[in-house]
Image: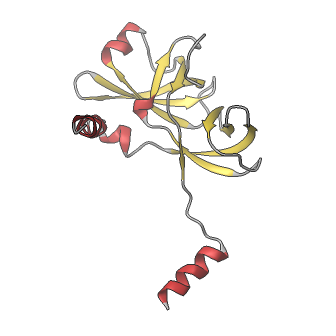
Amino acid sequence: MRKIPAITIGLASTAPPVARAQQPNLDAIVEAYDSSYGLMTLAVRGGHFLVPAPPDVIGHRHRLRVFAGDVSLARVPSQASTILNDLPARILSTTKRREHEIVVVLGLGTEGAGERLLARVTRRSWDQLDLAEGMLVHAQVKGVALVQRPRHDALSCSSVIARRK
């Protein structure tokens, strides 16, 4: 049992800082909820994400985080996959990380004018797919995190004041 946490920690620490710390949060709005599958549809500039989550009010705002290691790139949309989020995106720029790794900046939507995502790919994958800046690709997003927003309502403020007294 001790090996599993060590492996998990080791994998988490190998992601380059640009892929971990500089991943932007995405502003999203709840558009729908599918109670049959427990999936919320969240709209962002340039696309939509399906996220497993409890029901929420249509129009409620959320922040999403997608880590670069959770994004793969494809030249065509996936036909049959367990990945729920396959979004058209344009390759805006790249940064070589280490000798055989590339961090790709993507703009969501066919024109690339939507929210920005990062993808971390190997140089081998980049070369085999013959990827290039400006190219339209499909960002296949394996994982999406709902980011907790700090509460600024009267209840949370009054409970902080009460604790200080």
Q: Position of residue 69 (x, y in %)?
A: 40, 31
Q: Position of residue 75 (x, y in %)?
A: 52, 12
Image quarter hosting the N terminus: top left
Residue placed farthest to the bottom in the image? 165
Please report the residue visible at 22 percent of the width from the left and 24 percent of the height from the top.
99
Q: Within the image, what quadrant is residue 50 found in?
A: top right
160 over 37 or under it: above or below:
below
Give whichever of 95, 101 is nearer the camera: 101
Q: Position of residue 70 (x, y in %)?
A: 44, 30
Q: Position of residue 117 (x, y in %)?
A: 50, 34
Give whichever of 128, 85 is nearer the camera: 85
- Give the total of numbered labels: 0
Please report the residue visible at 61 percent of the width from the left and 70 percent of the height from the top.
152
Q: Tell whether 128 sits left or right of 98.
A: right
Q: Within the image, what quadrant is residue 96 found in?
A: top left
Q: Within the image, what quadrant is residue 158 found in?
A: bottom right
Please report the residue visible at 65 percent of the width from the left and 71 percent of the height from the top.
153
